[in-house]
Image (cartoon, grey):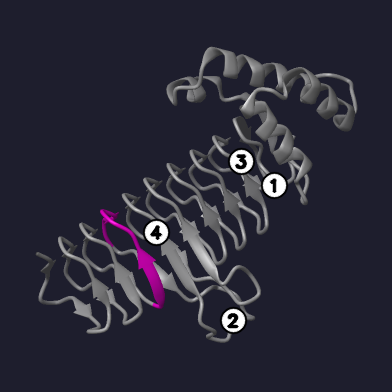
Amino acid sequence: MTDVHPSASIDPNARIDEGCSIGPFCVIGPEVTLGSGCTLGPHVSVLGKVTIGERNRMIASIAIGGPPQDLKYKGEPTEVVIGSENVFHEFTTVNRGTPGGRKVTRVGSRGMFMAYSHVAHDCSVGDHVIFANGATLAGHVEVGSHATVGAFSAIHQFCRVGEYAFIGGFSVLTKDSLPFVKTVGARGDANIYGINTIGLERKGFSAEAVEALKTAYRMLFQSKALLQDALEEAEKRLGNHPEVAYLLRFIRESKRGIQR
């Protein structure tokens, strides 16, 4: 059974699955699909074409599916797709895609989005992410699963954040952020600070995998070899480790360059 507060405004064409709780002054538009067991606190707005999975929690004053903050957008049909079991804290915003991008903004499952987080148009966010307070993505950003974006950090449009990346608070990143690596710093001056050893151990990575990543990191960023030569050598020595193979592939596929 769904519990709807009398002050909530729900379009009759919206699809609300069983077991949802919709709080005071929520607004849900006609193209919204809300999965079972979702909880919407007071003043949550879900508008536009939005598909939300099961058991998401939206604490209060959240805007999902608003139009992209892009001057080129003229009201074309675009959407937001969100997975299951996320927690969205106060004043989080997730905007729809644009015709010039993917036409869809995607958020995975089991993420934590703290107060004032922002996911802009055409972004793709993986599973198990943590966005601390004020973490902000510009348009077209890709964030891998298990990544952490620190408080009041901003990621430039078209950048990628690798899986298990850790971005420290108050960072402004204009290049791709390496997977498994700690990155922090102001615009134009962000630096990397090694493999996030403690974080990876907490997430269950084996000692062998962590040591392989640390060895690859030293070869790539602490030797005097050219990066291309270091990539080839690391692949020969450590490419059989899936984690290292992903790190090397991430670097090779970078279009904006990587934070170093």
Q: Are marks 2 and 1 in contact (CB under 8 Å)?
A: no
Q: Are marks 2 and 3 in contact (CB under 8 Å)?
A: no
**CA gap, disc 2 and disc 3:** 28 Å
**CA gap, disc 2 and disc 1:** 28 Å
Name the residue tied to disc 2.
Answer: 73
Picture disc at residue 92: 4
In the rendered image, residue 117, in percent from the top left (x then y), is placed at: 44, 54
Q: Residue at x 34, y 50 (%)?
A: 86
- Quarter of the image for residue 242 reads top right
Q: Amino acid at mark 4?
A: Thr
Name the residue tied to disc 1.
Answer: 187
Nearest to the observer: residue 243 or residue 139: 243
Res 259 visible: no
**CA gap, disc 3 and disc 4:** 22 Å
Q: Amino acid at mark 3?
A: Gly
- Of mark 2 and mark 4, the one earlier in the sequence is 2
Give the mark count.
4
Picture disc at residue 162: 3
In the rendered image, residue 77, in percent from the top left (x then y), is placed at: 51, 82
Residues shaded magenta: 48-60
Nearest to the observer: residue 14 or residue 198: 14
Q: Amino acid at mark 1?
A: Arg
Q: Quadrant of the C terminus?
A: top right
Q: Secondary structure at mark 3?
A: loop
Crowdedness of circle 4 by 10 Å Cα count: few (<14), some, many (20+)? many
Q: Residue at x 49, y 50 (%)?
A: 135
- Of mark 2 and mark 3, the one earlier in the sequence is 2
- Quarter of the image for residue 221 reads top right
